[in-house]
Image (cartoon, rainbow, N blue to C red):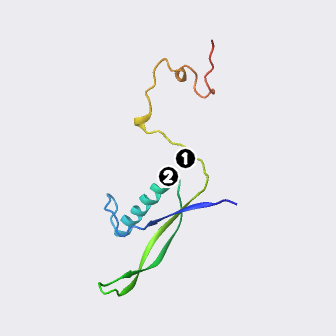
Amino acid sequence: MQSYEYKVVAAPRQAKRMKGARTVADRYARTLSELMNAEAATGWEYLRADTLPVEQRKSFMGATGESFHTVLIFRRAKGRPAEQHEPTIAEVRPLRAEDPELRRPLGLGPARRDD
């Protein structure tokens, strides 16, 4: 049986301003999308959103009240190997004419050494 670890993140309360998003609903949807994509990039899978009650003190005298907070729940499999890192443009080294990768025809598999 697969076991998971979970991560809970507070849902954004306001939409960020974004170019091209005209309505509040569009901006909020893009804000949520950015948050979910950022978590997915680190291996977390979106599971669901929940709204949960939280008891909090309302006054200095100790009176309490209840408020509700929305959270986003993510999961990932435990013991999963690390994600393959895709290099950015800054990390890629320039090719040189003496590199063996440039001497072989494309699509023919690994280069062979003829010593």
Please state which amino acid type lies under the numbered disc 2.
Thr
Read off the residue under disc 1.
83
- Which sits in the foreground, 23 or 113? 113
Element on which disc 2 rests: loop
Marker disc for residue 6: none
Give the x, y percent position of residue 8: 48, 65
Please state which amino acid type lies under the numbered disc 1.
Glu
Instruction: Give the quarter of the image for residue 76.
Output: bottom right
Lower sequence index among marks 2 and 1:
2
Give the x, y percent position of residue 7: 51, 62
- Which sits in the foreground, 101 or 68? 68
Label 2 Cα neighbours within 10 Å, binned few <14 / some 14-19 / many ≥20: few
Instruction: Give the quarter of the image for residue 62.
Output: bottom left
- Which sits in the foreground, 58 or 12? 58
Residue at 54% x, 43% y: name it: 84
Residue at 50% x, 55% y: name it: 40
Residue at 60% x, 51% y: name it: 80
Element on which disc 1 rests: loop
Read off the residue under disc 2.
42
Cβ atoms under marks 2 and 1 closer than 8 Å: yes
